[in-house]
Amino acid sequence: MSIIDTPVRTTSKLTCLKTNGVTTIIRYYNFTNSTQLPEKRLELAEAQAIAASGMQIGVVFQQGQNNASAFSDAQGFAAGIRAFRYARNDIGQPAGSGIYFSVDFDASTSQVNQRVVPFFEGVRRAFSQESGGGPSYRVGVYGSGLVSSLLTAQGLIELTWLAMSRGFRGTREALQAGEFHLEQVPPERTLCSLDVDFNNPNPARPDFGAFTLA
């Protein structure tokens, strides 16, 4: 099993990726693409093509989210509304699958408690509002071991994806304890002319929230 994530559109490379053993492609949700990464957001046509090729899809929401100022309750609520509606209305992502939210920096304990926790409280409130008590999505985090452990302890996430840096707080400990669903493996690589990262699943937690489309 090869699980990759990439910020670029994969549609034209799916045959190559499948030949190289890729079984799951993780792509992005966001508010807007940047000029540096104009293909970052997963679109329906690409999602349908991935599903038609027999591969699964994973998704992570990221709009910056690489410093503490990007995190607050209001920002989490807005991200949660956008992610939920885009997943449901634009992609047709099935309920019960996962949406990860990126915390793409080495947050300290105080930054997690003061900024990241409120962000995920906002995400959860948004998901509750949008689901109306009906089927919803599982919330995950992409980030450090410290971030994931503190969010897990507060019941704010169901899925953990450990970021690549082994120098991030708590990541080595989370890996050793098996407290993750996915681990991003260094270094960054190129596959089928695409910039990708490889990820290992945790055999003890095989359901990391991936999905396919009908």
Image: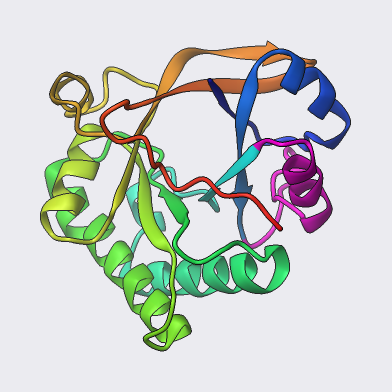
Quarter the C terminus occupies:
bottom right
Task: Give 117 or 139, whichever is nearer the viewer.
Answer: 139
Q: Is residue 67 above or below residue 79?
A: above
Q: How many marks?
A: 0
Dominant SS in magenta:
loop
Residue 198 image position (x, y, % from top left): 53, 20
Residue 130 point in image, percent of width and height: 47, 83
Residue at point 13%, 59% (across, down): 154
- For residue 211, say whether it is visible: yes
Coordinates of residue 87 in the picture (x, y in percent)? 60, 65
Q: Residue furthest bottom?
A: 132
**Residue 192, located in which quarter of the rendered image?**
top right
Residue 38 visible in the current orientation: no
Extreme residue toward the right, this view:
12
81 to the left or right of 6: left
Q: Position of residue 122 (x, y in %)?
A: 33, 72
Q: Is residue 144 magenta?
A: no
User: Which residue is pictured at 70% across the width and 44% down the height?
Assistant: 40
User: Quick check: 172 left or right of 49?
Assistant: left
Range of residues picked out in magenta: 31-55
- Indicate the quadrant where residue 37 lies: top right
Relative vertical location of residue 138 with respect to residue 25 in this rendering, above or below: below
85 lies above or below 56: below
Say whether residue 53 is magenta.
yes
